[in-house]
Image (cartoon, helix red, strand yellow):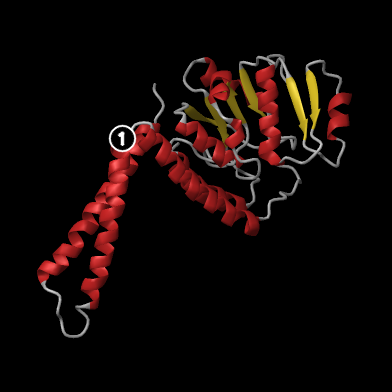
């Protein structure tokens, strides 16, 4: 860890290896080891570290995984936007240019791209990418506003954190940081975790819309979204009816077809406009 780091909090999430012993043996006076009696999951371990960072009056809390994929040399780049007041949350992005994710398995690249788009829609941070990148930094101000009790403790943690931060309108930025890959193998069961992640993103999307655009402001985004969904639904039903009545002897008139197409097109237009407004709202101030 570079000299600019004041505290090093090592969270041993009921590990079966020598994580805690090795951290203590390093002999760095800045280090504090927290050993959890029961496994809390990646989110639980990280939130434990954040809570301790608050207790230590840290200005910024940074997450580095224990697999050495997160290079401390890039720590200043992660901290600069927060120090400059441009953001209160920053995260690494491995997809910043050609060759930047060399060494990442192909299935993980494809999965990250697909998950990134879904996370953009669910979290509202359309300016962010690579949501599973855990190399993050968050300011004390943002941490104090965050209710950690409601954030997922398991593999959905990164996505859930972004959703909660966006509801609080915390400005966030990506920082181009390459990952370092060794011979470690991910323990994530994709067949088991993928459906859970999709269900969580779906629920998170509607949670964010309800809190951010209905309860807090009832903005044009909510009007466009709900109105667009209603018109699109009506248009689909009428379109299905019109198609059914044009097969064989035509019984649907031109007016009936227009009546079916009009709400469908209007609804689709309103949904696009709701997305555009959501994208504009997520852009950080410059």
Please report the residue visible at 68 percent of the width from the left and 33 percent of the height from the top.
Answer: 46
Under circle 1, the secondary element is loop
Taking the image as drawn, is residue 100 in sight? no
Please report the residue visible at 40 percent of the width from the left and 35 percent of the height from the top.
Answer: 212
- The answer to whether residue 170 is above or below residue 42 is above
- The answer to whether residue 141 is above or below residue 270 is above
Q: Residue furthest front?
A: 215
Of residues 8 and 164, the one drawn nearer to the viewer in this rendering: 164
Q: Residue furthest bottom?
A: 248
| Left or right of 199 in this view: 8 | right
- The answer to whether residue 209 is above or below residue 240 is above
Taking the image as drawn, is residue 84 in sight? yes
Rendered location of residue 126, percent (x, y): 43, 38
Figure quadrant of residue 254? bottom left
| Left or right of 86 in this view: 102 | right
Q: Dot 1, how many residues are within 10 Å of its Cα: few (below 14), some (14-19), or many (20+)?
A: few
User: Quadrant where the N terminus lies?
Assistant: top right
Of residues 261 and 65, the one drawn nearer to the viewer in this rendering: 261
Figure quadrant of residue 53? top right
Rendered location of residue 268, percent (x, y): 27, 53
User: Quadrant where the C terminus lies?
Assistant: top left
Q: Which residue is mark 1?
A: 219
Please report the residue visible at 79 percent of the width from the left and 34 percent of the height from the top.
Answer: 36
Rendered location of residue 121, percent (x, y): 43, 44
Total of numbered circles in the picture? 1
Please report the residue visible at 71 percent of the width from the left and 49 percent of the height from the top.
Answer: 186
């Amino acid at each position: 860890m570079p000299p600019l780091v004041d505290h090093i909090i090592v969270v041993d999430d009921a590990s079966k290896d020598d994580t805690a012993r090795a951290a203590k043996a390093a002999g760095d006076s800045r280090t504090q080891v927290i050993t959890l009696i029961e496994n809390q999951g990646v989110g639980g371990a990280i939130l434990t570290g954040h809570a301790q960072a608050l207790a230590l009056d840290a200005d910024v809390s940074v997450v580095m995984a224990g697999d050495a994929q997160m290079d401390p040399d890039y720590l200043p780049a992660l901290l600069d936007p927060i120090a400059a007041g441009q953001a209160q949350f920053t995260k690494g992005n491995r997809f910043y240019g050609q060759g930047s994710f060399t060494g990442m398995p192909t299935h993980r690249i494809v999965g990250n791209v697909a998950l990134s788009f879904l996370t953009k829609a669910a979290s509202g941070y359309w300016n962010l990418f690579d949501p599973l990148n855990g190399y993050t930094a968050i300011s004390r101000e943002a941490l104090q506003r965050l209710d950690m009790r409601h954030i997922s403790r398991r593999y959905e943690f990164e996505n859930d954190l972004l959703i909660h931060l966006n509801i609080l309108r915390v400005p966030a930025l990506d920082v181009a940081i390459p990952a370092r890959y060794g011979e470690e193998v991910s323990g994530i069961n994709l067949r088991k975790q993928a459906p859970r992640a999709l269900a969580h993103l779906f629920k998170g999307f509607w949670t964010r819309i309800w809190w951010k655009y209905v309860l807090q402001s009832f903005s044009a985004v909510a009007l466009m979204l709900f109105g667009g969904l209603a018109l699109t639904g009506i248009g689909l039903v009428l379109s299905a009816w019109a198609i059914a009545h044009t097969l064989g002897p035509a019984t649907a008139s031109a007016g009936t077809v227009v009546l079916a197409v009009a709400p469908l097109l209007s609804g689709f237009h309103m949904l696009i406009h709701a997305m555009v407004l959501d994208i504009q709202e997520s852009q950080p101030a410059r």
